[in-house]
Image (tube, rainbow, N blue to C red):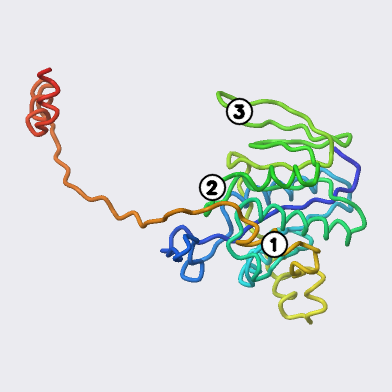
Amino acid sequence: MNNKDLDIYVLIKQVPDTRSKAGVNPDGTIDRAKAGKMLNPFDAYALQAALNAKKMGGPNSKVTAVTMGPPPAIDILYQALEHGADKTLMLSDRRLAASDTLATSYALCQTLEYAFKQNGRPGDLIFCGLQTTDGDTAQVGPEISERLDFTQITYCEDFSISDNEVHAKKIIEGGTQLVKAQLPSLITIANSYQKLKFKTLRGAQFVQDIKRSSKEEQSKYVEIIDLDACHAEELRCGLAGSPTIVSKTWKIGVVGGNCKMHQGKSVPDLVGEVVQDLPILEEFVKI
């Protein structure tokens, strides 16, 4: 148990719903307007980790969910509040469009530093999902830890906090590794961690009350800022700040074909039938 009050941040992202058909823009980016939207599945594990970490800290520990995206991304912030986050923060600016991982990590780093300043001190813990379903790079979390000079633990599937340290079990090739790191720390959570618990009735009612309240009251729980507010340099954001080049994209069609079942005979007979149906394989067998 850690008696220190912890300032905990969790980075979440709204991604195209994997069940919907997302198109591709001429510049190679995803046409998000045509796709359904959902909370990045990997970030759900990070949100649960942040909520669990809050219980490990002092009585005044708080969780702030942070996202970057267009106005509709506010939906996942409400979702975070329903599950138990104390506050949310969104960086939303048209100049962020087409950001790659370098530009994204810079913009989110500026957003976090804005939050730290508003809170009067740096954060203690930042949780991230392992990766996103619309990028699959797993780069943004480690890039942010480097920019903020936080210790980092990646592929974490369990952790505890005590004496200003994080003790974690992380996945490595061929097994797991036990590590510890000093706070402040950034942790990327593996999808072998605990699944996000169901939202509570109290949380759902809390969000409904927020939506019905005044804008001033809403801003206490859902704050929206732009690049100017967090002092981000425009040329380091969006397409201008993204050195990644998508040279070509194409749509992969459904691969069809026929299936023939061979059964009910001896193994030599079955193999003979397969070889007979595949002339190329038959020539290979003769060699």
Horizontally, residue 277 falls left or right of residue 53, namely: left
Instruction: Please say if the residues under marks 2 and 3 sit with CB atoms less than 8 Å apart.
Output: no
Mark 1 or mark 2: which is in front? 1
Residues packed near mark 3 inside 10 Å, few (<14), some (14 to 19) or many (20 plus): few
> What residue does disc 1 label?
235
> What residue does disc 2 label?
136
Badge 2 amino acid: Asp
What secondary structure is marked by label 3? strand
Horizontally, residue 285 falls left or right of residue 129, namely: left
Q: Is residue 21 above or below residue 163?
A: below
Badge 1 amino acid: Leu
What secondary structure is marked by label 2? loop
Q: Give me the disc on residue 172.
A: 3
Q: Is residue 19 above or below residue 257?
A: below
What secondary structure is marked by label 1? helix
- The image quarter in which residue 212 lies: bottom right
Q: Residue 146, how many percent across, how many down?
A: 75, 42
Q: At x 73% / y 58%, what residue is drawn?
A: 65
Closer to the chain start, of discs 3 and 1, is 3
